[in-house]
Image: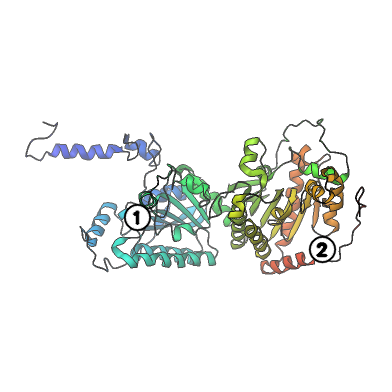
């Protein structure tokens, strides 16, 4: 006989014991272990044994994300139940009644107002505990109403998703919510409302194929499973075993669909930093305090001293010269790295994000070359694939939507030349980046901080103001390649450098750039502190001047600036020594 159980007799003590046990312990669906409920709750509903993040109720989400657990729930629109009178094994109305009884919610959407980092915000939670978070008419109406409320109140909007997709019991009426919610998202964008999507476990189907993948910023909660069709369905269709990490948050990050993967405990601060920039909160300029990495100054640089032009080439490539992420770490406060092109991949060669540049909220992009062998391979020496340039275009549009200055620090030998790039449209990606940069209605400052190589550089170099560090270079091709092609001898690389007119002084003489930023004696690699101070202040000066111009006038002025370039250029060209004419 089992403890506490008598045959044929209902044991009330046993029922009481089971209720208490359920309140004290919870079984993890992932690892199968029993977890003390108090530990589970204090760990933000994450299994302390295996790290599985469980579905949170709307109240738990609001307490997690809003400042000081302070928020006000908004009423949901009234919608008639079961318009199709649908019944499977159980009538749809009975399923609704059961879900309402179990969750205490009218339907799958719950909305509340509060603040995140002091920024007035509306949070809309798609509750995975209510019929698997499926989206029907009630959910669609609630999402539309919440977004319209955010627009009317000028509040930032955060959408938290956990869903199996569209609600089958409402058939086409559910499917139409994909279009209806997208209309509401378009209104958010048109009104300049920040729209952040937090994708939690699980998010699938018509939800991911509509409002959940249309945010300004996509955050995937660590451990979330996200996709369109379910894993089992895909494996059955293609008759293949999918990789273990398929449709995980990290998988989506690698494939460019989300900006970041964030642990549950870090979500509030992450969203607060994002909203601070997008809503242009005030910040004190960051105090620049950097240390120049040690390097062997006595080491002779091969090729140095042939002529001034080629000396600049070698200085622009110096291994100790600061790169994009070095400038970000030294100058920018509240930096948030944003990833992905929303199409195919995250390209580490093109870095991007938002933060405060000396107190100015801005969108910042640039090529990162890496410093160690491992990081250089990861960043591909700053040579971006099409995915990187499409990410840059996304950042340009983000800057335009929120009227944030766009700052570009370009430093690349050129766009990556490889099979994958050609297959995914390298030429089109570079061309579109040039076009997007020329058309955005927001201040745009581009700075050549090292190697300005070919189309890969100008793709993010079409600013209202183009600046150039003193020892940077700008050219259509590397001088070594130019010498090999035209002189038929790589030994003429210094001669080619001088003939190509690729230095900052040459660019200023030809009106290609607007300002030369001086470097410390010996070059930027000798004194990072001074270099960053000079660069930071030069960019601030240009942004302050550009912000005095109406943003709707900037694209036309920018276009005329580039149309005027190369007209009536007449500069001295050195004689070609050792070449037959």
Give whichever of 301, 537 is nearer the camera.
Answer: 301
Q: x, y (%) of residue 190?
A: 54, 67
Q: Residue at x 41, y 38 (%)?
A: 51
Distance (Cα) linking label 2 and label 1: 59 Å
Precedes in sequence: disc 2 or disc 1: 1
Left or right: residue 310 versus residue 116 is: right
Residue highlighted by disc 1: 133
For label 2, the crowd category at 10 Å Cα-Cα, with few meaning under 14, some 14 to 19 and many 20 or more, is: few
Q: Quadrant of residue 581?
A: bottom right
Which is more foreground, mark 2 or mark 1? 2
Q: Is residue 367 above or below residue 289?
A: below
**Image disc number at residue 217:** none
Horizontally, is 447 left or right of 109 in the view?
right
Q: How is the image coloured?
A: rainbow
- Residue 556 sits in which quadrant? bottom right
Q: How many marks?
A: 2
Identify the residue under disc 2.
566
**Circle 1 Cα neighbour tier, 10 Å, few/some/many (<14 / 14–19 / ≥20):** many
Q: Residue at x 63, y 60 (%)?
A: 428
Element at label 1: helix
Image quarter where the N terminus lies is top left
């Amino acid at each position: 006989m089992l403890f506490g159980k008598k045959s044929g007799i209902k044991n009330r003590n046993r029922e009481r014991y089971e209720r208490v046990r359920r309140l004290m312990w919870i079984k993890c669906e992932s690892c199968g272990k029993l977890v003390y409920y108090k530990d589970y709750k204090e760990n933000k509903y994450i299994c302390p044994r295996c790290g599985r993040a469980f579905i949170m109720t709307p109240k738990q989400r609001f307490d997690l994300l809003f400042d000081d657990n302070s928020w006000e729930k908004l009423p949901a629109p009234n919608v008639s139940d079961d318009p199709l009178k649908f019944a499977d094994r159980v009538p749809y109305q009975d399923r609704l009644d059961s879900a309402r009884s179990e969750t205490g919610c009218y339907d799958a959407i719950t909305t509340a107002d509060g603040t995140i980092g002091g920024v007035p915000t509306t949070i809309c939670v798609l509750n995975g505990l209510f019929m698997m978070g499926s989206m029907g008419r009630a959910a669609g109406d609630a999402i539309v109403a919440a977004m319209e409320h955010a627009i009317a109140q000028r509040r930032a909007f955060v959408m938290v998703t956990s869903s199996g997709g569209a609600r089958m019991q409402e058939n086409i009426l559910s499917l139409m919510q994909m279009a209806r919610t997208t209309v509401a998202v378009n209104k958010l964008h048109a009104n300049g409302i920040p729209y952040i999507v937090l994708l939690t476990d699980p998010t699938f189907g018509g939800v991911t194929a509509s409002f959940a993948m249309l945010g300004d910023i996509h955050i995937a909660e660590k451990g979330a499973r996200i996709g369109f069709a379910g894993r089992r369905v895909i494996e059955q269709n293609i008759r293949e075993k999918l990789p273990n990490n398929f449709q995980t948050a990290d998988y989506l990050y690698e494939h460019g669909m989300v900006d970041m993967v964030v642990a549950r405990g870090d979500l509030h601060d992450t969203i607060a930093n994002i909203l601070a920039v997008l809503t242009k909160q005030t910040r004190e300029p960051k105090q620049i305090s950097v240390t120049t990495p040690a390097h062997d100054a006595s080491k002779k640089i091969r090729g140095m001293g042939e002529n001034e032009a080629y000396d600049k080439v070698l200085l622009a490539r110096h291994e100790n010269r600061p790169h994009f992420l070095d400038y970000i770490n030294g100058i920018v406060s509240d930096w948030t790295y944003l990833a992905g092109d929303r199409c195919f991949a995250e390209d580490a060669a093109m870095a991007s994000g938002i933060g405060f540049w000396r107190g100015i909220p801005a969108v910042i992009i640039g090529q990162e070359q890496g410093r160690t062998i491992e990081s250089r391979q990861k960043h591909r020496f700053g040579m971006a694939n099409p995915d990187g340039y499409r990410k840059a275009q996304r950042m340009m549009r983000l800057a335009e939507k929120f009227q944030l200055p766009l700052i570009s620090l370009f430093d690349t030998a050129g766009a990556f030349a490889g099979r994958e790039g050609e297959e995914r449209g390298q030429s089109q990606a570079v061309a579109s980046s040039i076009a997007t940069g020329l058309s955005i209605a927001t201040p745009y400052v581009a700075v050549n901080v090292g190697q300005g190589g070919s189309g890969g550089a100008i793709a993010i170099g079409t600013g209202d103001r183009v600046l150039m560090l003193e020892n940077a270079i700008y050219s259509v091709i590397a001088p070594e390649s130019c010498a090999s092609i035209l002189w038929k001898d790589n030994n003429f690389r210094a001669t080619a450098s001088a003939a190509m007119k690729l230095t900052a002084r040459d660019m200023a003489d030809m009106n290609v750039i607007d300002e030369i930023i001086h470097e410390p004696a010996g070059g930027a690699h000798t004194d990072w502190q001074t270099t960053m101070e000079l660069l930071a202040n030069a960019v601030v000066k240009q942004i302050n001047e550009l912000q005095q111009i109406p943003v709707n006038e900037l694209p036309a002025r920018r276009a005329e600036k580039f149309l005027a370039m190369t007209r009536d250029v007449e500069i001295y060209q050195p004689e070609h020594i050792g070449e037959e004419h």
